[in-house]
Image (cartoon, rainbow, N blue to C red):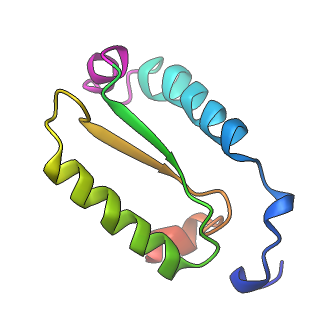
Amino acid sequence: MNSEDDFDTSDGPGKDEAIAETRRWVERAVIGLNLCPFAKAVYVKQQVRFVFSDATTPEQLIEQLGEELLLLRDTPAEQIDTTLLVHPYVLRDFLDYNDL
């Protein structure tokens, strides 16, 4: 595969598809398999924020992550308890993700 800078975003899912796939994963794996015992309560109360990132570099993703952390800090947990930052165009390899 080309470097992250050369990634063609048309090769990946769009926003709606990526968010829908992530919601299915949360429902089936995280909640369905009880991987996180706290996930169901905040999910059914719609306190999980799903954010699509069109970042194509780790630097762009880190910047967006910082913005989301500030939003979480400044928003009551009753409104947003958890954010899932969906980033289909960067850190596609788990080892790269893990290194960040």
- Quarter of the view holding residue 78: top left
- Taking 94 as reference, is 72 left or right? left
Expressed as whole percent of the image width and height from the top left, the position of residue 74 reads 15, 50
Q: At 45% from the left edge and 77% from the top edge, which residue is drawn?
A: 99
On screen, residue 68 above or below 79: below
- Taking 56 as reference, is 27 left or right? left
On screen, residue 63 above or below 65: below
Taking the magenta stretch, the answer to whether it contains residue 67 is no
Q: At 28% from the left edge and 23% from the top edge, which residue is drawn?
A: 42
On screen, residue 22 above or below 95: above
- Taking 98 as reference, is 37 left or right? left
Expressed as whole percent of the image width and height from the top left, the position of residue 20 reads 64, 31
Count how many numbered circles sit on residues in the image: 0
Expressed as whole percent of the image width and height from the top left, the position of residue 93 reads 64, 67
Expressed as whole percent of the image width and height from the top left, the position of residue 95 reads 55, 71
- Quarter of the view holding residue 21: top right
Q: At 51% from the left edge and 76% from the top edge, which residue is drawn?
A: 60
On screen, residue 41 above or below 59: above
Taking the magenta stretch, the answer to whether it contains residue 38 is yes
Specify the quadrant that holds the N terminus: bottom right
Q: Tell me which segment is drawn in magenta.
A: 34-45
Specify the quadrant that holds the C terminus: bottom left
